[in-house]
C-alpha cells in the first residue's frame, strides 16, 4: 500500500507541473513552464505517469467525478429521473426547475473543470509533439489516449452548452479571448480526435484494468457520437465492433456485478484511487445512496413517476433501486458502497459499458429499417432484466413503437449515469413534451445551460445562450 501511495503522489506531482488551468497559466512565466513540460517528457516513465495523472484527475474534477457537481448529478436533476429531496440547495434546484442563473456555481464548476481537463490534454499533446527523446510508437499511443479525453470532454460541453470555445492549444493569450464556435465545428473536431485515437490508441488496457483508453473504448464512444449525429450506419458499425468482442465484454447475469471494478461489462471506468485519500468509494455511491442510519445526509432521490415505470419483476428495479423508509424515498443503488477505506477498491465509476452499445445499435438498426435486428438487441437487454422478449410478445412491432421502447429501455438501463436521460430527451426533441406540463416556466431555450457569467466577465468575446 505504501508503494501505491508513493506512486500516486509522484503522478500527481507530474500532473501538477504540466497541467495548469487556463486561468492560472496567465500568471506564469511561459519560458519556465516550457522547461517543466520538457522535463515531464524526458522519458517514458514520467510521460506515462503524466497520462495516468490525467486519468486520475477525471475522478477529482467536478464534471467527470460523479459527485455533487458532476454531469451525472446535475444533468440528472435536469431530467425526469432524479429530483432534489429538499429545496434548500438553490443551485441544484435551478437545474431541476430549469431556471438557471448564469452565476450558478455548479454550472461554473462543470464548465471550468471541463476546460481544465481540455487544457491538460492540450498541454500533454504539445509536450509529446516536442518530446524528441521518446520512442515514436510510444508517443503515438499516448497521443491517441489524450485525444480521446479531449474529444470526450468536448462531447459533453457541446451537448450541455451548444456553441462553445474550441481550445486546442495552451496559448493563453488566444484562449482567454476565444469566441464560441458552432456545434458543427466542435463535432468535426471531436470526430477528428476520435478517429485519430482509434488509429493510435493501444489495443489492450494498461495493467489489465479498464481505466485506460484502448481502441475499443474509442469505438464505443464513436458509436455514441455517430448516434447523436444521426449517422446510423457508422453508429451501428462501431457498436457492432465492440459487441462482437465477446471475449472481453459480456453482460453479466448478476446485475450486482455490473459496477464492480473491472466488471466484464465495463468498457471504460474511472478509479476512485484518483481521489488520493484514504476513502475508496465512488463519488456516485457516496452521493446517490441514502444510508439507512445517516439519511439526513441525503440530497437527491429518484422521482416516483420514474420508479413506477418499472415492472416489479424487472431485475434492474430489484437490484438497482433502493428504498429508504425514513424518507419514504427511492434512490439509485447501482453502486453499493456508500463509504469505505478498504483496498483493493471494490467499485469503479462506470463511464462506458456494453449495455449502452446494444441500445445504440438497436436504435441505429431501427432507424435504418432493420426492425428484426433492433428487436434482437433490445431483447438482450430485456432478457437480462428478466422481462418478456419483444420477439415473442410483439412480433409485429412498428418502427415508431420500437423507437419508443428503445428510449424507455435507455431510461431504465442508464439512469443515474452521465446525464443520459437529459441528453436523450434533448437529441430526440422531447424536452418540451416532457417538461411543459409540469413546469409552467419551461422554454425551449432551456435545453442549454447558460454560459457562466464568471467566464463572460473575463472574456468579452463569450456570447450568452438565448433565454439567459
Image (tube, rainbow, N blue to C red):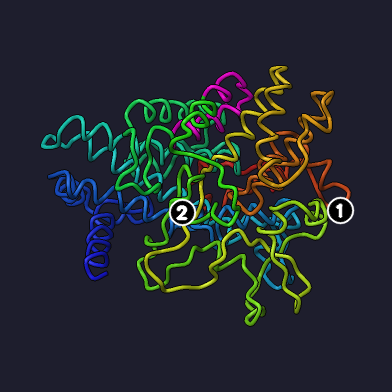
Give the residues in magenta.
Answer: 217-237
User: What residue lies at 12% left-to-right and 45% top-to-bottom?
Assistant: 42
Compared across the picture, whether 241 is left or right of 48 comes to right
Report the Cα–Cα distance between label 1 and label 2. 32 Å
Tell me which secondary structure the magenta stretch mostly adopts. helix
Q: Residue at x 28, y 58 (%)?
A: 16
| Mark 1: secondary structure | loop
**SS at circle 2:** helix
Residue 122: percent from the left, percent from the top?
Answer: 33, 40
Instruction: Kindly identify which residue carries mark 1.
Output: 438
Give the residue furthest to the bottom. 293
- Residue 388 lies, in percent from the top left, at 78, 40
Left or right, 110 with respect to 13, comes to right
Q: Residue 410: percent from the left, percent from the top?
A: 69, 41
Q: Quadrant of residue 83?
A: bottom right
Side (left or right) of 464 relative to 2: right
**In this view, 145 is above or below 337:** above
- Pointers 1 and 2 in contact (CB under 8 A)? no
Q: Earlier in the sequence, mark 1 or mark 2?
A: 2
The residue carrying mark 2 is: 113
Residue 112: numbered disc: none
Q: Is residue 159 magenta?
A: no
User: Dot 1: within a 10 Å radius of its alpha carbon, few (fewer than 14), some, or many (20 or more) residues?
Assistant: few
User: Which quarter of the image is occupied by the N terminus?
Assistant: bottom left
In the foreground, 162 or 284: 284
For this rendering, which residue is in front, 449 or 309? Answer: 309
Q: Is residue 205 above or below residue 86?
A: above
Residue positioned 74% across, 51% down in the render: 314
Please determine whether, in this image, residue 287 is positioned above or below residue 405: below
Check if residue 234 falls in the magenta segment: yes
Left or right, 301 with reference to 267: right
Amino acid at each position: 500500500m505504501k508503494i501505491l501511495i508513493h506512486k500516486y503522489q509522484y503522478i500527481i506531482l507530474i500532473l501538477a507541473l504540466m497541467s495548469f488551468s487556463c486561468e492560472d497559466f496567465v500568471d506564469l512565466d511561459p519560458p519556465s513552464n516550457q522547461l517543466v513540460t520538457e522535463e515531464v517528457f524526458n522519458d517514458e516513465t514520467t510521460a506515462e505517469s503524466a497520462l495516468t495523472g490525467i486519468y486520475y484527475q477525471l475522478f477529482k474534477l467536478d464534471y467527470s467525478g460523479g459527485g455533487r457537481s458532476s454531469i451525472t448529478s446535475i444533468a440528472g436533476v435536469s431530467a425526469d429521473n432524479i429530483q432534489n429531496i429538499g429545496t434548500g440547495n438553490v443551485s441544484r434546484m435551478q437545474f431541476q426547475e430549469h431556471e438557471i442563473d448564469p452565476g450558478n456555481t455548479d454550472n461554473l464548476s462543470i464548465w471550468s473543470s471541463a476546460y481544465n481537463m481540455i487544457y491538460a490534454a492540450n498541454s500533454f499533446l504539445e509536450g509529446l509533439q516536442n518530446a524528441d527523446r521518446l520512442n515514436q510508437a510510444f508517443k503515438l499511443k499516448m497521443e491517441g489516449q489524450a485525444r480521446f479525453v479531449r474529444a470526450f470532454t468536448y462531447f459533453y460541453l457541446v451537448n450541455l452548452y451548444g456553441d462553445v470555445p474550441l481550445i486546442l492549444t495552451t496559448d493563453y493569450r488566444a484562449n482567454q479571448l476565444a469566441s464560441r464556435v458552432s456545434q458543427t465545428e466542435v463535432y468535426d473536431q471531436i470526430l477528428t480526435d476520435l478517429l485519430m485515437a482509434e488509429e493510435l490508441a493501444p489495443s489492450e488496457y494498461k495493467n489489465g484494468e479498464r481505466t485506460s483508453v484502448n481502441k475499443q473504448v474509442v469505438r464505443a464512444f464513436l458509436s455514441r457520437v455517430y448516434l447523436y449525429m444521426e449517422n446510423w450506419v457508422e453508429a451501428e458499425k462501431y457498436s457492432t465492433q465492440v459487441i462482437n468482442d465477446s471475449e472481453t465484454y459480456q453482460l453479466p447475469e448478476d446485475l450486482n456485478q455490473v459496477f464492480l471494478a473491472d466488471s466484464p461489462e465495463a468498457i471504460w471506468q474511472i478509479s476512485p484511487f484518483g481521489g488520493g485519500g484514504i476513502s475508496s468509494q465512488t463519488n456516485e455511491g457516496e452521493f446517490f445512496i441514502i444510508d439507512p442510519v445517516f439519511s439526513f445526509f441525503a440530497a437527491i432521490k429518484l422521482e416516483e413517476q420514474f420508479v413506477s415505470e418499472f415492472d416489479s419483476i424487472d431485475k434492474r428495479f430489484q437490484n438497482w433501486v433502493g428504498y429508504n423508509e425514513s424518507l419514504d424515498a427511492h434512490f439509485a443503488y447501482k453502486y453499493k458502497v456508500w463509504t469505505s477505506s478498504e483496498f483493493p477498491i471494490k467499485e469503479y465509476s462506470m463511464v462506458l459499458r456494453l449495455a449502452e452499445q446494444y441500445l445504440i445499435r438497436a436504435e441505429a438498426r431501427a432507424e435504418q429499417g432493420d426492425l428484426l435486428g433492433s428487436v434482437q438487441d433490445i431483447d438482450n437487454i430485456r432478457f437480462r432484466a428478466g422481462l418478456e422478449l419483444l420477439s415473442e410478445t410483439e412480433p409485429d412491432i412498428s418502427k415508431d413503437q420500437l423507437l419508443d421502447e428503445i428510449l424507455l429501455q435507455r431510461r431504465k438501463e442508464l439512469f443515474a449515469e452521465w446525464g443520459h436521460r437529459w441528453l436523450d430527451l434533448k437529441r430526440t426533441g422531447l424536452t418540451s413534451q416532457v417538461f411543459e406540463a409540469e413546469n409552467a416556466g419551461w422554454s425551449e431555450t432551456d435545453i442549454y445551460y447558460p454560459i457562466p457569467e464568471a467566464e463572460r466577465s473575463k472574456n468579452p468575446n463569450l456570447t450568452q445562450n438565448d433565454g439567459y
